[in-house]
Amino acid sequence: MIKGFKDFLMRGNVVDLAVGIAIGVAFTTLVGAFGNNFVKPIVASIGGGGADSKGFGFHIRDSAATFVDIGGIINALIVFVVTMAVIYFAIVVPVQKLQSLRKPGDPEPEAVPEDIALLREIRDSLQRRA
């Protein structure tokens, strides 16, 4: 059972997946910081308001707990689109290109087993005698 688990972990796909997840987490942190420190202030400035304003959004009631942060939603959407675009253009497209280069052109025909080849030689030899 342990050997089977070890074989499963050592497959190339599992290791590649683990590396991809680690890179994705690091990249998501980077893009999240970009969104919170660059995009969110720009979206909040569009919403207007004073120094105590939370940015672009509205209150359902006169309570801070009921503030609907539309700027935060727009920020999350922009971060998502940027993340997906970078993943697509930096990872998916190059991997697809490499896979297309690795595909063999025309598959070679399978070799005829030795016993069948020997039987064909015998058949051909008997046909020539007759």
Image (tube, rainbow, N blue to C red):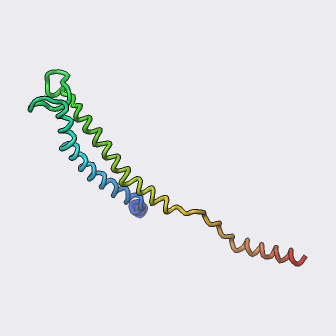
Q: Is residue 96 above or below residue 49?
A: below
Picture coordinates of residue 17 (x, y %)?
37, 55
Picture coordinates of residue 6 (x, y %)?
39, 63
Q: Residue at x 42, y 63 (%)?
A: 7
Quadrant of the image containing the N terminus: bottom left
Residue 83 vs residue 17, the one in the foreground: 83
Outermost residue to the right: 130
Instruction: Describe residue 100's horizontal placement relative to residue 77 as left or right.
Output: right
Residue 123 vs residue 45, the one in the foreground: 45
Quadrant of the image containing the C terminus: bottom right
Outermost residue to the top: 61
Tell me which corner region of the image, top left, top right, bottom left or bottom right, holds residue 64: top left
Count of numbered circles in the view: 0
Q: Is residue 110 above or below residue 26?
A: below
Tell me which corner region of the image, top left, top right, bottom left or bottom right, holds residue 96: bottom left
Picture coordinates of residue 82 (x, y %)?
31, 45
Instruction: Describe residue 129's horizontal placement relative to residue 60 as left or right.
Output: right
Q: Residue at x 9, y 32 (%)?
A: 51
Instruction: Describe residue 26's horizontal placement relative to residue 98 as left or right.
Output: left
Tell me which corner region of the image, top left, top right, bottom left or bottom right, holds residue 97: bottom left
Q: Is residue 122 above or below residue 33?
A: below
Q: Residue at x 57, y 62 (%)?
A: 105
Q: Residue at x 45, y 60 (%)?
A: 98
Instruction: Describe residue 120's horizontal placement relative to residue 72 as left or right.
Output: right
